[in-house]
Amino acid sequence: MPVLPAFLVDPLWAQFEALLPARPVYVPSHPLGCHRRRVADQVVFEKLIQLLRFGCSYEAIADSTCSATTIRNRRDEWIKAGAFAQLKQVALEAYDRIVGLLLEHITVDGCITKAPGGGEVAGRSPVDRGKQGMKRSLLVDGYGIPLGRVLAPANRNDSPLLAPTLDKLDDLGPLPDDITVHLDAGYDSAKTRNQLERRGLTSEIAHKGEKAPIQAGRRWHIERTDAWHNAFVRLARCYERRATIIDAFFDLADTIITIRSLIRRARTTHRCTNRSQRHF
């Protein structure tokens, strides 16, 4: 069974291929004038999606078609070229053009996951007996589409990560005049309210000491997005040590989430007479 259905993998690869620089099948600089045939980029791309979804090691996912070293080398090559970040941006622009991002209501929240291998953005987790963990401060729109994130050690508080997370809004182009930021009780402080006021943002913050279900508001969308992210085992239990690699896997996951949401929502906003009745 494929890791993702064809209606997701095919458009993802078509767009990703368009972002890659042209490379010859054989290396022309080889001293003997010959070389082993270059492994197809599509094979490596599908291996990376399998890594993201299953969370296994590079050696476990490698086979006769592609070695673990090739996967790592091609991954680093694409990260250096900025292909994963560009792919996410293309998906966001397509979603905004067809469905529309709900930027009038945005949500920021932190989520702690495991990082057994340590690394640049790992630290002692306060919710996992001091084991190595990673925190992502996530920014989503009113429907839960991931707009950006900040990675930090698990022992960092949510409040200091709010400012760099909100800075991700600068990459989205024109913004609505009135934006409401929905936050949980961890951000309930005068410092946070003053910071949002200086940015010209309206705040809706849960109060400390009150039960969460009573004042959940619109924050449940980001909880759903966290669940979508954690369905990719590579993100829920991260063995990568370099922040650039983790960001690349997050960009790939954000792209899959955005395209999947686009297909689902476009079925109700863009109808045609002979459309399929199948629900994804």
Image: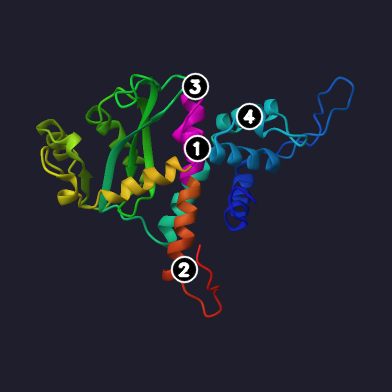
Q: Residue at x 22, y 50 (%)?
A: 179
Measured Cα–Cα span from mark 2 to mark 4: 37 Å
Tell me how far mark 2 sits from mark 1, CA to CA: 28 Å
SS of the residue under disc 1: helix
Q: Is residue 112 visible?
A: yes
Mark 4 or mark 3, earlier in chain: 4
Mark 2 or 4 closer to N-term?
A: 4
Q: Look at mark 2 in the image and give the residue it sits on.
A: 267
Q: Nearer the viewer, residue 228 or 177?
A: 228
- Name the element at disc 2: helix
What secondary structure predominates along the stretch shown in magenta?
helix
Q: Position of residue 171 (x, y in %)?
A: 37, 41
Q: CA distance from mark 2 to mark 3?
A: 40 Å
Amino acid type at circle 2 is Arg
Which residue occupies the foreground of this view, 21 or 138?
138
Q: Are marks 2 and 3 in contact (CB under 8 Å)?
A: no
In front: mark 1 or mark 3? 1
Residue 119 coordinates in the image, percent (x, y): 46, 19
Q: Residue 211, percent across and down?
A: 14, 44
**Position of 68 compared to 93: left or right?**
right
The residue indicated by pointer 1 is 233
Residue 241's mark? Answer: 3
